[in-house]
């Protein structure tokens, strides 16, 4: 384990379902991130939270809704997804600032059917 | 727009040789450059960070260079082993934001043959 735990590891959902991805870190980091990784494409930044405040929303469709209730937990709520949203969703945390590496979770492999 | 390019073709080398991976970028002046390793089905793992005012950084068998004039970073693994086989990602950070936002390249897959 890296210190960042993501659940579930795998998720299959229909286009009309509502589900949530969970991320948890107890590293004392103050910034958390959601990335999307599709096959043959670079990691795409979705959301950034710094000190529990959303500081970036990278033009992500509203069917993805993040939530950061405290500095240790991050959620990604999903509803009315499309098949092209199928991907590996990665959560990461860091000390914040540009000076630190990220610690990633193992990701949630999402398949939308 | 900002662009990061890593060789999309897999790099195949023999065990014991030095692997060299390239990261080029355009329309960007990053303050920091980072390298990550990613194994199939797993999240990336942080390896090294180098700042814009540093030419070279080493960690065990790893060496990273950062040339802001050429807009290029080279990542070297010396005495490579089959266990080094993975995809290696470069990532850049810059600007005044304190969120440490990273932009990633698409990665280069390294295969070390015994």
Image: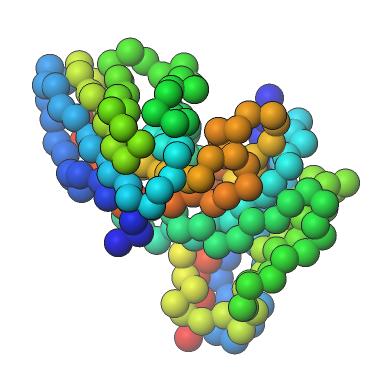
Q: Nearer the viewer, residue A5 or A31?
A: A31
Judge left or right: residue A1 versus residue B20: left
Compared to residue A28, the image places residue A83 above or below, namely: above
Residue B8: x and y, percent?
57, 51
Q: What residue occupies the far top of the structure in this picture? A: A62
Q: Which quadrant holds the N terminus of chain B?
A: top right
- Residue A98 locus on image (x, y percent): 62, 42
Q: How many marks?
A: 0
Residue drawn at point x = 51 percent, y = 81 percent = B81
| Residue B80 seen in render | yes
In the image, A97 versus A57, the foreground residue is: A97
Q: Residue B48 at x, y = what percent?
A: 61, 61
Q: Is residue B97 left or right of residue B109?
A: right
Corner quadrant of residue B79: bottom right
Residue drawn at x 44%, y 31% as measured from the top left: A51
When asked about the image quadrant of residue A82, the answer is top left
- A24 sits to left or right of B72: left
Q: Is residue B113 visible?
A: no
| Above or below A70: residue A63 | above
Residue B93 rendering spot, x and y as whole percentages: 64, 40
Residue drawn 33% across and 13% down?
A62
Toward the right, the furthest residue is: B69
- Front position in the image: B31 or A50: A50
User: Which residue is pictured at 55% across the width and 62% down the height?
Assistant: B47
Measured along the vertical axis of the image, is residue A59 above or below residue B8?
Answer: above
Nearer the observer, A95 or B3: A95
How does the figure colour the protein chain or chains?
Answer: rainbow
């Amino acid at each position: 384990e890296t210190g960042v735990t993501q659940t579930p590891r795998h998720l299959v959902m229909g286009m009309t379902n509502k589900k949530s991805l969970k991320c948890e870190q107890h590293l004392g980091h103050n910034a958390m991130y959601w990335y999307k990784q599709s096959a043959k494409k670079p990691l795409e930044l979705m959301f950034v939270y710094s000190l529990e405040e959303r500081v970036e929303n990278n033009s992500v469709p509203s069917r993805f809704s993040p939530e950061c209730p405290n500095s240790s937990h991050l959620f990604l709520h999903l509803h009315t997804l499309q098949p092209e949203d199928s991907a590996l969703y990665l959560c990461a945390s860091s000390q914040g600032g540009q000076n630190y590496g990220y610690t990633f979770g193992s990701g949630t492999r999402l398949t939308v059917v | 727009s900002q662009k990061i390019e890593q060789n999309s073709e897999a790099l195949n080398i023999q065990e014991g040789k030095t692997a060299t991976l390239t990261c080029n970028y355009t329309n960007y002046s990053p303050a920091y450059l980072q390298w990550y390793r990613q194994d199939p089905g797993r999240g990336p793992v942080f390896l090294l960070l180098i700042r814009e005012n540093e030419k070279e950084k080493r960690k065990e068998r790893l060496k990273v260079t950062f040339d802001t004039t050429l807009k290029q970073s080279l990542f070297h693994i010396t005495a490579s082993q089959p266990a080094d086989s993975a995809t290696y990602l470069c990532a850049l950070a810059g600007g005044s934001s304190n969120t440490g936002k990273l932009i990633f390249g698409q990665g280069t897959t390294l295969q070390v043959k015994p």
